Image (cartoon, rainbow, N blue to C red):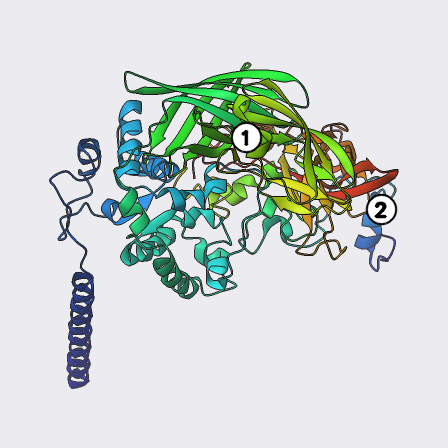
């Protein structure tokens, strides 16, 4: 018995030694792999910035490549860095003042940001566009490992080394250990590995666009012309001026809504990140608005979105054009589309239009200019005769002598209307700390194109039209109980305003004011009524919110 | 109670005490267990499944700490496991104190 025990003990010792030996051996192999993935060392003495060194180096050491561990192996948007710093404060004891935090976001975005092109591809995510449907990413591993929880924008707004993409998997397992359980329908670590292989190839750290861009700074100071569109209120034009005082950038903007004949003034502080990304905090008629904009590579345009800070569903898209004095430049025309067989008046908005002559416009075949009347240097009225055989479709009408940004659309008739957003999400709020999220519905007129069939590739989007709006039960003919509680739609503008959040004791089973309905738009055209329909879900607040 | 018949004295007693004409105060979820979903999918609150909101716990305040406590919907509801351990301190009973629920930065 005693011999047996000794034998067992010896066998155990041999087994333990073998395990330790192999573990050490494999660990060594792993280190070798890490070392061979050589990354060029940091140039210069400062790691990102003095503020980053002061705030981050207490934990993030300089590694064998001469870089700050983790930080110098990834690039992110200002919003991404802001989230990272918030997490460091929340979980890892980082103590910074408001000013230091701002400086950190500024420095990290400037040194380790995205290129203008990379940022543009995730603009919808950064601006938190409401009811926006992301283009589908056709990689099943990303869908099953990442997008089961969050949108693709979250990873598409980052660039990392392969090692750092791998770290992201471990990060998720530590931060959200329940990931195993709530993904129990799949083998999450395996699917995540496959997703990471794809991400490392698709979104690597090194990128020529960023290398070419880094260190550059757009100068936005000066005057700009603005054109924008806000669903439910229509198009607007205006003027803006950026001013730098003591290193602080501010903006003053005045816009005029064309359909409603209403003017609004905004003033705000502007922060520029990565040399092109503008983030504004506006005051407009007692409201707080926030802007998420990017300056174009040529420095002559700024595009982006704004939203109401207290109702993120109220938004608009805007483009700025740098004011110049050389030639006429048209930034907007109203209406945007003209019908065959008619003579129509259009108003062109822009700058230097007093210099505009009939020869400066290259009108499509079958369209001729009948009249031109200059209202001011910013506005000109023209009359266009469109013959019965005029070519339908969108045409560029600018020439070397006049810049015209919008295309002129010629159509034979309006065949149908389409309502956006195609899948709308509004959120209850406004009673506690959560904001209401309204939905701005818009009906667009369409022509079926040459094939006369609705929904084919040759269909032409013409313009937004004024429709009559109503809500209906969903699915059709089913219970209409939701309609009594969820909120209301403005029959003239298409603005849906959700009801208040909270438990509604009036409602059966003490439900909230949530529900699911159809939104119907009716547009009268040529004696007929064209109908468009979309789906609206009114739901609970979004607690995890990048902005708030 | 329309389709079942009591077989023993206990069942009969139960039947006598239940007011079958009374409107029910609660209703079972139409598709169990949608309200406390088994899968982790975005849009839980926005009807990703296309089955309307019948499967969503209502009011959601009764369920929110079920999602919060064990970090079940980390992308939609603050997670109590790692990031926001004290999130519920201000509002221990969400169904009563929902006005105090706050936004968090994900």
Q: Which mark is residue A330?
A: 1
Q: Is residue A220 visible?
A: yes
Q: Is residue A400 left or right of residue A42?
A: right
> In 3D space, how far apart are the residues under numbered discs 1 and 2 (Cα atoms)?
48 Å
User: Do discs 1 and 2 share a chain?
Assistant: yes
Image quadrant occupied by the N terminus of chain A: bottom left
Q: Position of residue A106 (x, y in %)?
A: 30, 32
Question: What crowding class fits label 1: few (fewer than 14 Cα within 10 Å), some (14-19), or many (20 or more)?
Answer: many
Residue A315 in sight in this render:
no
* Picture residue at 72% right of the left edge, 48% below the top: B28
Callout 2: chain: A
The residue located at (60%, 31%) in the rendering is A358
User: Tag 2's secondary structure?
Assistant: loop
Query: In which chain is the residue bearing label 1?
Result: A
- Find residue A363 and report its horizontal and vertical position in percent: 62, 40
* Residue located 30% across and 46% down the image: A210
Closest to the observer, A134 or A328:
A328
Dot in front, 1 or 2: 1
Looking at the image, is mark 1 or mark 2 earlier in the sequence? 1
Residue at which label 2 appears: A477
Quarter of the image for residue A200 reads bottom left
Judge left or right: residue A307 versus residue A44: right
For the point 16% across and 61% down, the residue is A35
Image: A130 above or below A173: above
- Side of A454 relative to A253 (left or right): right
The correct choice, above or below, for A439 with respect to B54 in the image is above
Secondary structure under the numbered disc 1 in the rendered image: strand
Location of residue A348 by image quarter: top right
Q: Residue A375 in the image: state x and y as whole percent.
A: 61, 18
């Amino acid at each position: 018995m005693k011999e047996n025990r000794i034998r067992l003990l010896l066998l155990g010792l041999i087994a333990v030694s073998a395990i330790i030996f192999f573990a050490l051996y494999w660990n060594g192999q792993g280190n070798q792999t890490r070392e061979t993935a050589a990354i060029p060392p940091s140039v210069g003495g400062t790691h990102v910035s003095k503020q980053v060194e002061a705030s981050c180096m207490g934990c993030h050491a300089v590694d064998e490549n001469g870089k700050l561990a983790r930080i110098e192996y990834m690039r992110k948007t200002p919003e991404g860095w802001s989230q990272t710093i918030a997490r460091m404060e929340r979980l890892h004891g980082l103590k910074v003042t408001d000013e230091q935090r701002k400086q950190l976001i500024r420095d990290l975005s400037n040194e380790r940001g995205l290129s203008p092109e990379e940022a543009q591809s995730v603009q919808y995510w950064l601006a938190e566009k409401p009811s926006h449907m992301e283009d589908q990413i056709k990689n099943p591993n990303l869908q099953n490992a990442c997008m089961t929880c969050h949108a693709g924008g979250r990873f598409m707004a980052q660039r990392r080394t392969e090692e750092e993409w791998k770290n992201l998997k471990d990060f998720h397992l530590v931060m959200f250990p329940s990931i195993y359980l709530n993904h129990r329908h799949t083998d999450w670590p395996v699917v995540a590995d496959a997703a990471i292989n794809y991400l490392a190839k698709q979104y690597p750290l090194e990128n020529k666009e960023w290398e070419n861009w880094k260190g550059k700074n757009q100068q936005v100071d000066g005057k700009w012309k603005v054109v924008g569109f806000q669903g439910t209120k229509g198009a607007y034009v205006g003027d803006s001026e950026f001013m730098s005082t003591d290193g602080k950038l501010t903006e003053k903007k005045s816009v005029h809504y064309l359909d409603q004949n209403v003017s609004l003034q905004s003033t705000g502080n502007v922060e520029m990140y990565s040399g092109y990304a503008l983030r504004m905090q506006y005051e407009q008629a007692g409201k707080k608005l926030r802007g998420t904009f990017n300056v174009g590579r040529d420095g002559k345009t700024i595009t982006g979105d704004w939203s109401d800070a207290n109702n993120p569903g109220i938004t608009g898209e805007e483009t700025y054009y740098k004011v110049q004095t050389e030639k006429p430049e048209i930034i907007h025309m109203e209406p945007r589309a003209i019908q065959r067989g008619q003579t129509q008046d259009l108003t062109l908005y822009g700058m230097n239009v007093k210099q505009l002559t009939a020869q400066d416009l290259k009108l499509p075949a079958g369209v001729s200019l009948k009249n031109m009347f200059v209202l001011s240097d910013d506005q000109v009225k023209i009359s266009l005769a469109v013959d019965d055989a005029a070519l339908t479709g969108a045409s560029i009408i600018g020439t070397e002598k006049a810049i015209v940004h919008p295309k002129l659309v010629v159509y034979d008739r309006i065949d149908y209307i389409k309502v956006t957003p195609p899948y709308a999400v509004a959120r209850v709020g406004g009673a506690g700390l959560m904001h209401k999220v309204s939905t701005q519905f818009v009906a667009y007129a369409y022509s079926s194109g040459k094939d006369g069939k609705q929904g084919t590739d040759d269909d032409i989007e013409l313009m937004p039209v004024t429709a009559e709006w109503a809500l209906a039960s969903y699915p059709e003919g089913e219970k209409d109980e939701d309609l009594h509680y969820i909120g209301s739609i403005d029959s003239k503008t298409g603005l849906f305003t959700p009801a208040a959040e909270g438990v509604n004791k009036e409602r059966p089973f003490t439900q909230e004011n949530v529900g699911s309905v159809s939104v119907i738009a009716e547009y009268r055209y040529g004696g007929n009524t064209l109908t468009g329909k979309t789906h609206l879900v009114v739901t609970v607040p979004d607690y995890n919110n990048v902005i708030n | 109670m329309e389709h079942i018949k009591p077989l023993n004295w206990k069942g009969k007693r139960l039947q006598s005490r239940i007011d079958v004409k009374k409107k029910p105060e609660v209703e079972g979820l139409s598709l169990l267990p949608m309200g406390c979903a088994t899968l982790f999918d975005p849009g839980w609150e926005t009807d990703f499944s296309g089955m309307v909101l019948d499967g969503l716990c209502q009011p959601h305040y009764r369920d929110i700490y079920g999602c919060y406590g064990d970090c079940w919907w980390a992308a939609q509801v603050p997670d109590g496991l790692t990031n926001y351990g004290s999130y519920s301190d201000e509002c221990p009973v969400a169904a009563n104190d929902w006005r105090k629920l706050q936004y968090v930065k994900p």
